């Protein structure tokens, strides 16, 4: 039996060190994300056989994340399968990356299905590449930033502080109002709720961010937090859509603000949004981190292969 309980801020003390020591670079394991999206997924946690295990619900179905830590993976996976079955659910494991998939192939019983969802792949970049925009591949981005700086010589990027959260909320609301005309209103509301949680627990979550001003007015902001020892996650990034180049500048400046110990920057998924996919690809990611879902019966949708 696994002693699951609701995830709390106090769990950061033991969860973060486990993930820091792991090779997990996917945004699903950023503690700030785990906490700020807990309202939507009902996330629960346990330290089981020396491994971090996470249980949550997605579309009404019980699901788990890939276990993290030095414990016996095969035994822990079997315990998760039993946990799901005892709750009357087929076992569903999400966010499994390639290295995890290889480890799991020797742990899973027969007749499991494996599927990949491209919409949830993470885009991971070299921090130095985003900070310098050096080289031919990123010349267009470099020119875009330089044009913005030339057109707005009074622009200023500074670390984000709680005194500016109100301005960030105002900017996000204007941004969301435009997106809601053609987008998912409920999804935008969920994003705002997650962001507000981060602002309300800024110090407890260990996050940081930056603010971009033009003429003393906030035109973009960004928020992020570490995932593991070498990867930093960009959790929120919003900019004034009427100011071309603001996104490119805040992206570059945040990469410069991130401590150099973080070799990689995870800019998360594109969720199947064509424009967002094009924008993320235009920065030439170092890694497209594909994720798999594993289920004990044929999952809904996707291209499946037998394990």
Image: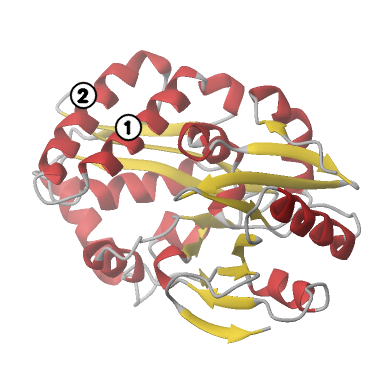
Q: Residue furthest top?
A: 163
Task: Tell me the quarter of the image containing the C terminus.
Answer: bottom right
Other-residue count near label 2 (Cα within 10 Å), few / some / many at <14 / 14–19 / ≥20 = few
Question: Residue 74, percent across and down?
Answer: 86, 65
Question: Residue 133, percent across and down?
Answer: 38, 62
- According to the picture, the residue beneath numbered tag 2 turns out to be 170
User: Tag 1's secondary structure?
Assistant: helix
Task: Tell me the quarter of the image containing the N terminus.
Answer: top right
Q: Nearer the viewer, mark 1 or mark 2?
A: 1
Q: CA distance from mark 1 to mark 2?
A: 11 Å
Image position of 163 with respect to 278: above or below: above
Question: Residue 48, percent across and down?
Answer: 85, 44
Q: Between residue 25 and residue 127, name the one nearer to us.
A: 25
- According to the picture, the residue beneath numbered tag 1 turns out to be 192
Q: Which mark is residue 222?
A: none
Residue found 51% across the figure and 75% down from its top: 116
Residue found 56% across the figure and 33% down from its top: 35
Residue found 28% across the figure and 17% down from its top: 166
Name the quadrant containing residue 13: top right
Question: Residue 239, percent across and down?
Answer: 23, 41
């Amino acid at each position: 039996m696994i002693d699951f309980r609701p995830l709390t801020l106090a769990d950061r003390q033991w969860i973060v060190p486990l993930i820091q020591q792991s090779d997990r670079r996917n945004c699903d394991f950023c503690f700030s994300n785990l906490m700020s999206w807990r309202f939507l997924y009902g996330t629960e946690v346990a330290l089981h056989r020396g491994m971090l295990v996470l249980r949550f619900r997605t579309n009404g179905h019980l699901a788990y994340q890939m276990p993290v830590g030095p414990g016996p993976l095969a035994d822990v996976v079997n315990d998760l399968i039993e946990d799901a079955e005892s709750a009357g659910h087929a076992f569903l494991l999400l966010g499994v990356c390639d290295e995890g998939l290889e480890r799991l192939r020797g742990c899973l019983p027969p007749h499991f299905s494996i599927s990949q969802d491209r919409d949830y792949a993470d885009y991971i970049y070299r921090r130095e590449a985003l900070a310098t925009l050096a080289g031919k591949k990123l010349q267009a981005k470099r020119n875009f930033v330089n044009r913005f700086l030339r057109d707005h010589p009074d622009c200023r990027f500074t670390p984000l502080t709680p005194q500016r959260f109100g301005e960030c909320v105002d900017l996000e609301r204007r941004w969301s109002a435009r997106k809601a005309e053609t987008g998912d209103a409920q999804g935008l509301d969920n994003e705002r709720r997650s962001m507000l949680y981060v602002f309300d627990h800024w110090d407890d979550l260990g996050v940081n961010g930056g603010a971009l001003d033009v003429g003393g007015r906030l035109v973009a902001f960004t928020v992020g937090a570490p995932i593991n020892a070498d990867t930093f996650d960009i959790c929120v990034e919003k900019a004034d859509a009427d100011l071309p180049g603001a996104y490119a500048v805040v992206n570059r400046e945040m990469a410069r603000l991130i401590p150099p110990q973080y070799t990689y920057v995870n800019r998360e998924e594109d969720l199947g949004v064509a424009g967002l996919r094009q924008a993320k690809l235009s920065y030439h990611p170092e890694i497209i981190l594909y994720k798999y879902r594993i289920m004990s019966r044929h999952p809904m949708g996707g291209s499946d292969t037998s394990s």
